[in-house]
């Protein structure tokens, strides 16, 4: 199996069976993200303690890529510090929007490598991350990809 197929499989798996889907009991941050081009929307619930993300869940509807991205985001950030998450967000964003090799290890997020060639799909893959960014900054407005 090629790396590309492996990546594809993982996106399909997380898109079909997203991890950490649901509502968090006591989130410290909640944020809605919206892609107006397709109408997809998700809500992210994040619990932080002492500068760490202790738990995260999401709900909403979206395409396979946006659900897979939200699912992988929840796995990637749990237990990390806010500074680590910010670095991960920046590296992932640059990776997708500028098609550049990430400067830090982005782990499973590398599965979105093929998405960088398709600007519309980049929005799908970054929706959850923009939402997270706004959640941690306590934005009061919904986030959109436009
Ligand atoms: Fe809506 Fe992907 S098509 S987020």
Image (cartoon, rainbow, N blue to C red):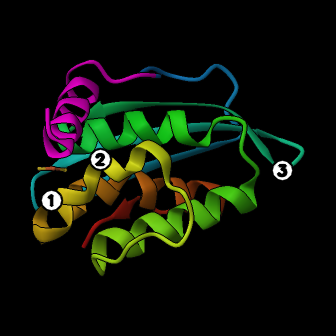
Circles 1 and 3: CB atoms closer than 8 Å: no
Up-down relation of residue 67 to residue 132 (above or below): above
Tell me the quarter of the picture where residue 133 sits. Answer: bottom right
Magenta includes 4?
yes
Between 45 and 83, the one lying in front of the other is: 83
Give coordinates of residue 89: x percent, y percent. Answer: 52, 63
Q: Which residue is mark 2?
A: 111
Determine the residue positioned at 27% across, 18% down.
17
Q: Earlier in the sequence, mark 3 or mark 2?
A: 3
Which secondary structure is most common in the magenta stretch?
helix
Q: How many numbered circles are shown?
A: 3
Q: CA distance from mark 1 to mark 3?
A: 31 Å
Q: In the figure, is residue 101 to the left or right of 136? A: left
Answer few, some or many: residues within 10 Å of disc 3's Cα (few below 14, many 20 plus, some between 14 and 19).
Answer: few
Q: Which residue is mark 1?
A: 121
Between 110 and 144, the one lying in front of the other is: 110
Q: Quadrant of the C terminus?
A: bottom left
Magenta includes 59?
no
Tell me the quarter of the picture where residue 42 sits. Answer: top left
Any atom of ligand 1 within 8 Å of the CB at mark 1? yes
Query: Element at badge 2?
Result: helix
Q: Which residue is mark 3?
A: 51
User: Which is more foreground, mark 3 or mark 2?
Assistant: 2
- What residue range appears in magenta? 1-19
């Amino acid at each position: 199996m090629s790396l590309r197929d492996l990546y594809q499989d993982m996106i399909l798996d997380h898109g079909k069976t997203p991890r950490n889907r649901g509502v968090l009991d006591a989130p410290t941050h909640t944020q809605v993200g919206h892609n107006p081009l397709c109408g997809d929307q998700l809500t992210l619930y994040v619990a932080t303690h002492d500068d760490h993300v202790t738990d995260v869940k999401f709900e909403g509807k979206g395409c396979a890529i946006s659900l897979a991205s939200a699912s992988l985001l929840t796995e990637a950030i749990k237990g990390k510090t806010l500074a680590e998450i910010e670095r991960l967000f920046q590296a992932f964003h640059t990776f997708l929007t500028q098609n550049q090799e990430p400067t830090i290890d982005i782990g499973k997020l590398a599965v979105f490598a093929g998405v960088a060639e398709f600007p519309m799909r980049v929005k799908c893959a970054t929706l959850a991350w923009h939402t997270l960014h706004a959640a941690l900054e306590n934005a009061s407005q919904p986030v959109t990809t436009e």
